[in-house]
Amino acid sequence: MIKGLTITPPVLGRISIGRVINKDGKRLPAKDDQFTITSQVQNKDGWVNHPLDEKLRARSEGKLRQIPVRMLFNDPDLNLRAQYTLFDRQTGRPLCVGDGEHCQRRTNNGMEQLPCPSPDRCPLAQGGACKPYGRLYVNLSEDDELGTFIFRTTGFNSIRTLAARLRYFAAVSGNKLSCLPLQLTLRGKSTTQSYRTPIYFVDLTLRDEVTLKDAVQQAKAIDHELSEHGFDQSALEQAATLGYANSCFEVDDEVSEVMEEFYPVADDSNKIPSKAEKAMQPNTRSIAQGLRQSVTAVS
């Protein structure tokens, strides 16, 4: 296996609740109040919808806000990958990836493991350059039982809710998460930070009209049936673990699109800096210079 190449689950398409639009000559991210399932093909208008989008949309009344899914793995951390991630805006390469305790960072000395203070307390993360970045891999099609669709998000609400649900479902099912009948559900809520405007996040629930008791019974039966037919779930999980560990950074194929949608450059040209921001400006410049030097050193 080629070292330094992260082996992630095969991706057949994308699940999103947002898109990039053209506004006043600029490409800006825009949120949506429904799911869209796209292929991995783009045209001049953006991502081309996957045939499953039309199929599932026909079953729903109006907007697509529920998607039946199956998890590929029993281990929650193999299905949902989430870290704080800092990208270099010029090269699109990840410079630092951390979990709030430790981070892997490109420096003048190469790759180093350093303390991760989280974006709120990290001088490199100023200006929204570092965010929680989550990728959820789910299976949608019985035609390809090892293929996945990826949902990307930098939202705390989605990451926190998905992480909790995956762990809870794994616990109550006796670690048979991959056999549960689940669905992605779009939820909305208002907060003071959103000025009472609804914001949407993704939840993971049981499918409609399926009780937890029935779901657990079904999962045990499916797991037993698969084992009798020689299906080795443990070997699949081990292969996925080794694939993720084959590189320090999990680099997406669509890095430029990820940065454009989730790490947009803030337009602060008309903003009057506060005293605190003025005091930080010299330090910010030195940090930016250090980042450029580290990129040059490892290029």
Image (cartoon, rainbow, N blue to C red):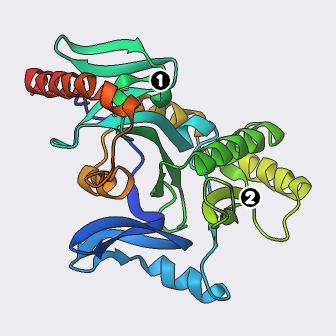
Quadrant location of the N terminus in the rendered image: top left
> In the rendered image, is residue 9 in sight?
yes
* Side (left or right) of 114 relative to 4: right
Given the image, on which type of amino acid does mark 2 rest?
Thr
CA separation, marks 2 and 1? Answer: 34 Å
Q: Position of residue 156 (x, y in %)?
A: 58, 45
- Residue at 34% x, 35% y: name it: 86
The residue identified by callout 2 is 205
Q: Is residue 291 left or right of residue 46?
A: left
Where residue 201 sits: x, y (%)? 61, 59
Q: In this view, does 170 lie above or below 118?
A: below
Give amino acid for label 1.
Arg
The crowd level at tag 2 (other Cα within 10 Å; few <14, some 14-19, many 20+) is many
Q: In this rendering, which labeled residue sits more in front, label 2 or label 1?
A: 1
Mark sitting on residue 121: 1
Determine whether 46 is above or below 54 in the image.
Answer: above
Residue 155 percent location from the top left of the image: 54, 49
Whether 200 is drawn above or below 9: the answer is below
| Residue at disc 2, secondary structure | strand
